[in-house]
Image (cartoon, helix red, strand yellow):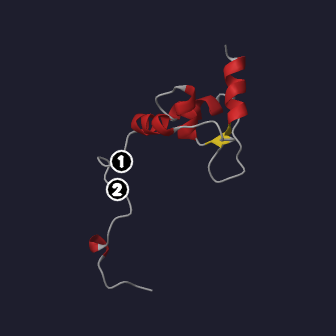
Amino acid sequence: MKSDTPRSAQPSQVEPAAKRPTPAQQVELVKATLNLANRVALNRVEAAAALGLRNPISIDRLVKRGLLHPSRATRRPLFPVEELQRFLRETV
């Protein structure tokens, strides 16, 4: 089904870069609200905040190096809290 509205007049799905928080800002926001008491697994931004990393890209690099092993059963990788604790124990 075609729309009568020209493509340039349709609203964009992507927000301007100025409005999106940087990865470091995302981690800071999550740190302020992160409560691990009842959590079983964390997404990559929450995992970065839990490990004290400034950027979630560092989590991706640890996965690529084989140091962290996420669960890939869902669309996005989940990091079990036990896996983050194992990583900290074994890399001391």
Q: Which residue appears at 62% of the width and 49% of the height? A: 76
Residue 83 appears in view: yes
* Secondary structure type for disc 1: loop
Report the front residue among 52 and 40.
Answer: 40
Report the front residue among 73 and 1.
Answer: 73
Say the numbered circle drawn on residue 20.
Answer: 1
Q: Position of residue 39 (x, y in %)?
A: 65, 41
Q: Residue furthest top?
A: 92
**Sequence-wise first label, 1 or 2:** 2
Q: How many marks?
A: 2
Kindly check if marks 1 and 2 are in contact, taking CB atoms under 8 A apart as contact. yes
Residue 29: quadrant of the picture: top left
Residue 62: quadrant of the picture: top right
Residue corresponding to mark 2: 15
Quarter of the rendering occupied by the C terminus: top right
Q: Position of residue 58 (x, y in %)?
A: 53, 30
Q: Position of residue 27 (x, y in %)?
A: 46, 35
Residue 90: quadrant of the picture: top right
Amino acid of disc 2: Glu
